[in-house]
Amino acid sequence: MRKYKIGVIGCGYWGPNLIRNFLQSPSVKQVACHDINAERLERMKVLFPSAETYSSYDKFMQSDVDAVAVATPVSFHYQIAKDALEHGKHVLIEKPITKTSKEALELIRLAEKNGKQLMVDHTYEYSPSVRKIRELVEKGELGNIFNISVVRVNLGLFQKDVDVIWDLVPHDISIFRFVLNKEPFSVRAFAESHILPGKYDTAYVLIKYPDNITAHLQISWLNPKKIREMTIIGNKKMLVYDDVNASEKIKIYDKSVDIGNNKEPIHTYYEKGGAFQFLYRSGDIHIPKLDEKEPLKGACDHFIDCIESGKKPLTDGYSGYKVMLVLEAIQESLNRNGDEVLLK
Ligand SMILES: NC(=O)c1ccc[n+]([C@@H]2O[C@H](COP(=O)([O-])OP(=O)(O)OC[C@H]3O[C@@H](n4cnc5c(N)ncnc54)[C@H](O)[C@@H]3O)[C@@H](O)[C@H]2O)c1
């Protein structure tokens, strides 16, 4: 197997995690990095003495790196990914792929034209927890899914160029896509800016999927606690995924409610003088054992595997585009005071 040289651009909070994971890969011979901020580059020299650093963007692009991972603020994703593809590099781009779906489509076409990989880091799709949830849903372990609710809140980090929706919601849209294997058909959203006028820091989003499945999200940068909790209600079982819990991330509750053979409308039972019986089932709670692999390591390994084999990444540019369409629909709903917006 060939060994690759990987470039990481943007060495703020997330970039160093990419550098660390690529340096640990046996398929990577070298990692190079670039940041517009000289202090961040100096910090990378201390953290990763074996990584090459480039202070010049042009020299970084003209270098012999085979692939570029883009971890700058979202506003720069499109131009940097475009430059990298035009310089014949494969691209791994952080979520959300770009600022608009039009830009995402342009990158997809450019990658296809140049025969290069374009992958989006929808990190959760590489997490053992989310993979286990998908497996359970696929096998019908929870039965028919009624709804999914998410609480994704903590204090900050306020992003400079995007609001809380663009920062956090891409994670959940990609998880829903992966777990349900369905595309949403409408969204409604409500959001508030408490700290900086015009920058949403708290939001509520309702997403409808085919088969009467609804998902709702509470998202905020203004909460004293870090909560990353997803609850999936099925007609057979219920599942709670707590990503902050180190050892018991997934709990499957053998609980459900049924109406047995009482299929007539409820008022008819009272009219006949009888009482309607709901059947509650409450069994064991199961905590599945999960692999311990770091999700980002899974994403980095997959990226290199796709470069080597030429296969389509699980989270390719198109999946980034699909997530972008939902973000744009959420934005439209906010512009229209929370109206339901149908996905194109
Ligand atoms: N996958 C995940 O779970 C995850 C988690 C956190 C952040 N992210 C994504 O990673 C990206 C970066 O987020 P962050 O929190 O690290 O931001 P950050 O602000 O901490 O870091 C961004 C870095 O990019 C540098 N930079 C800015 N413009 C540049 C340019 N034009 N050229 C080169 N360097 C430039 C900045 O100097 C800074 O060091 C965002 O797209 C974010 O959505 C993903």
Image (spheres, rainbow, N blue to C red):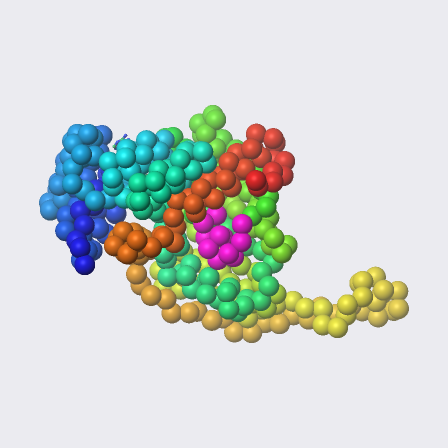
How many marks overall?
0
- Above or below residue 119? Residue 82 is above
Residue at the (68%, 71%) spot, across then down:
279
Front residue (pair 313, 342): 313
Q: Please tell me in which quarter of the rendered image ligand 1 is found.
A: top left
Q: Residue furthest right?
A: 272
Front residue (pair 13, 303): 303
Residue at the (42%, 69%) spot, across then down:
288
Front residue (pair 117, 272): 117
Residue at the (45%, 49%) spot, across then down:
174
Image position, residue 124 (x, y; %): 39, 53
Q: Residue furthest left?
A: 49
User: On the picture, is 211 further left or further right than 129?
Assistant: right
Image quarter for residue 94? top left
Image position, residue 210 (x, y; %): 61, 53
User: On the picture, is 208 further left or further right than 327?
Assistant: right
User: On the picture, is 332 further left or further right than 64?
Assistant: right
Is 79 part of what is drawn in magenta? no
Image position, residue 341 (x, y; %): 60, 38
Q: Quadrant of the N terminus?
A: bottom left
Q: Residue furthest top?
A: 197
Residue 109 visible to an observer of this rendering = yes
The magenta stretch is 173-183
Q: Quadrant of the C terminus?
A: top right
Residue 94 visible to an observer of this rendering = no
Q: Of helix, strand and loop, which mostly describes the magenta segment?
A: helix
Residue at the (16%, 32%) spot, across then down:
59
Image position, residue 54 (x, y; %): 15, 34
